[in-house]
Image (cartoon, grey):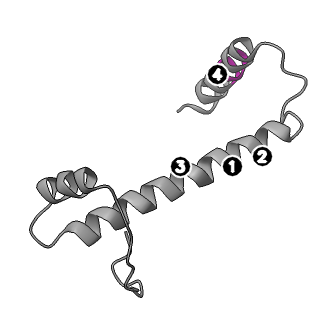
Amino acid sequence: MNTAMETIRLNITVPAEVLREVKQSTEKRGVSRFITEALVEKLDRVKRSKALKKMQTLPPAFPYITDSASYIRKIRKTDEKRMKRIGV
């Protein structure tokens, strides 16, 4: 997390039990950091989820590959032959 970010004071309402658990799980003055890290993690998950949904709407990157395992084996064999040929 970038510690040089500008900070803004925020008043939020949370269930009492949640706050108790947060306070028990953090250092004395670490509640803001804990909540900030939780928000950053949640935002990352939301962004990944949106990106995945977007990717699922795109056409396939390799439409000609029907069996990916066979394709990878073939590529690796080609690479191995090339490496032997050039002496690596």
Q: CA distance from mark 4 to mark 2?
A: 30 Å
Q: Which residue is mark 1?
A: 50
**Mark whose residue sits in front, 4 or 2:** 2
Q: Which amino acid, mark 4?
A: Arg
Q: Residues within 10 Å of mark 1 (few under 14, many from 20)?
A: few
**Mark whose residue sits in front, 4 or 3:** 3
Q: Which residue is mark 3?
A: 45
Q: CA distance from mark 1 to mark 2?
A: 6 Å
Q: Which residues are magenta?
A: 74-78
SS under mark 3: helix
Q: Is residue 55 left or right of residue 20?
A: right
Q: CA distance from mark 2 to mark 3?
A: 14 Å
Q: Which amino acid, mark 3?
A: Arg
Q: Which amino acid, mark 1?
A: Lys
Q: CA distance from mark 4 to mark 3?
A: 33 Å
Q: Which residue is mark 2?
A: 54
Q: Residue furthest left?
A: 28
Where, quadrant-wise, is the N terminus in this rendering? bottom left
Give the residue displayed 22% in from the left and 67% down from the top.
31
Question: Quadrant location of residue 10?
Answer: bottom left
Nearer to me, 34 or 60: 34
- Mark number for residue 76? 4
- Sequence-wise, which precedes: disc 4 or disc 2? 2
